[in-house]
Image (tube, rainbow, N blue to C red):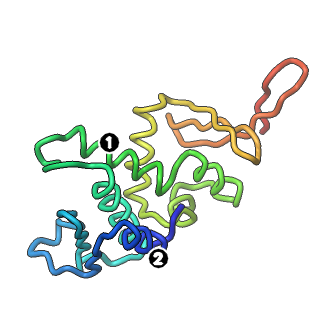
Amino acid sequence: MPSYDRLLDEAAAQGLTVIERYPFASSRIRGLCCDDTIALSAHIDTEAERRVVLGEELTHALHSAGDILDDPRMERRARERNFDRMVGLAGLVSAYLSGCRELWEFAESLNVPETFLAEVMGNYRERYGTHVTVTTPQGTFALSFDPLFRVRRLVRSKQGVQHKK
């Protein structure tokens, strides 16, 4: 998961200018990407939200073309890329391995707002269904998104895959 400073470095490497505290007239506007400039709202209070908004606007700058307001599919694709970049299935496993069990703990560990994590979970439930299996260098894990979020390490036995409790 890239840090805020790393995202700023990436934007600079791509030739993008980032205005970190732009005084948008509406506090509902959190960020905006236009041509080679990204503006982040002065109304953003936390580093976690600033990181997520910069990540999304950077994703728009690198992967979107034209006015995305005319194409909701382009906005959705950019948001999904940002979900994977800021959290990702492997990120959820990593947070679990570091001791996270409650959603607020995952959000804190991943340095994202809880509301953003809730959006990520909803999107992953749509994309992957209620369960998905993830293999990381630390092992294979089953992630359940419904009815509650759970992570379980899978272990191999002679009879096949077993869940470790």
Q: Residue at x 17, y 66 (%)?
A: 28
Where the N terminus falls, by quadrant? bottom right
CA gap, disc 1 to disc 2?
A: 24 Å
Position above or below: 157 against 124: above
Q: Residue at x 52, y 49 (%)?
A: 88
* Residue 103 point in image, percent of width and height: 52, 55
Position above or below: 117 against 142: below
Is the C-beta separation of discs 1 and 2 under 8 Å? no
Q: Residue at x 25, y 69 (%)?
A: 38
Where the C terminus falls, by quadrant? top right
* Residue 67 point in image, percent of width and height: 13, 50
* Label 1 sits on residue: 77
Determine crowd level at label 2: few under 14, some 14-19, many 20+ residues with C-alpha closer than 10 A.
few
Which element is circle 1 on?
helix
Identify the disc placed on residue 104: none
In the foreground, 55 or 132:
55
**What's the residue type where badge 1 is placed?**
Arg
Identify the disc placed on residue 5: 2
Which label's residue is closer to the chain start, 1 or 2?
Answer: 2
The answer to whether residue 129 is left or right of residue 155 is left
